[in-house]
Image (cartoon, rainbow, N blue to C red):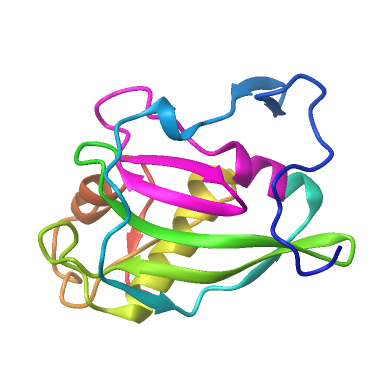
Amino acid sequence: WPGKPIISMAGPKRPGMGSWGGIMQIRALPSSWKRLSPPDRQERLDFTDAYTAEEADRILLGLIPKEMEDKWFVYSEGGRVHFHRSWTGALIYSFRMTTEGAGFRAGDARVNRVPEQYRGTDLAYDQRLLRFLVDALLLGKPATFPLPAGAEDSPAGVNQRTTVGRAYPDVSG
């Protein structure tokens, strides 16, 4: 059923569980963390990518914060992957996962444009940051944190720790 939203797919045998690198992970559910309703102002984001079935399984497992330094809560529901800030519960990014041949595709991405919830306005930066979040936090791939425009002179790691809470190098890109 190419092009249809993913609700579930072949993967771990136990519902709600996944295995990544030999470590069992619990699937993040909408009820796993506090979250606000979707924002009334969103902008389309040019974010698309292709994933293998294993990568899609890992993306759809999501991410539940384990400590204060974890800045993101990520879960999937109804074929959409939702990225909420863990402290405020604000939904910042979302995208749809669909089947495509033997793999999966991310598309129909959105970014929050309610200034009280998210002050970002740079679509190119939002695209780079969303890619970083997927690659680094959900897929565990080596990734370089993208610096926002004007942050090139800030001390190394400051932007990354504020935005992500994880130890990845700051470089402009």
The quarter of the image holding the C terminus is: bottom left
- Look at the picture and state if 94 lies above or below 48: above
Residue at 55 percent of width and 45 percent of height: 77
User: The N terminus appears in which quarter of the rendering?
Assistant: bottom right
Relative to 39, 98 lies left or right: right
Name which residue lies at 51% across and 49% down: 136
The span picked out in magenta is 56-85
Quadrant hosting residue 123: bottom left
**Taking the image as drawn, is residue 144 in sight?**
no
Whether residue 108 is visible: yes
Picture quarter containing residue 144?
bottom left
x and y percent of residue 19 in the render? 71, 26
Residue beneath the point at 16% across and 56% down: 117
Residue pictured at 31% horizontal, 23% vertical: 67
Q: Which of these two is toward me, 118 or 3?
A: 3
- Does the segment drawn in magenta span residue 139? no
In the picture as drawn, the residue positioned furthest to the left comes out as 116
Q: Position of residue 159 (x, y in %)?
A: 21, 55
Determine the image quadrant of residue 24: top right
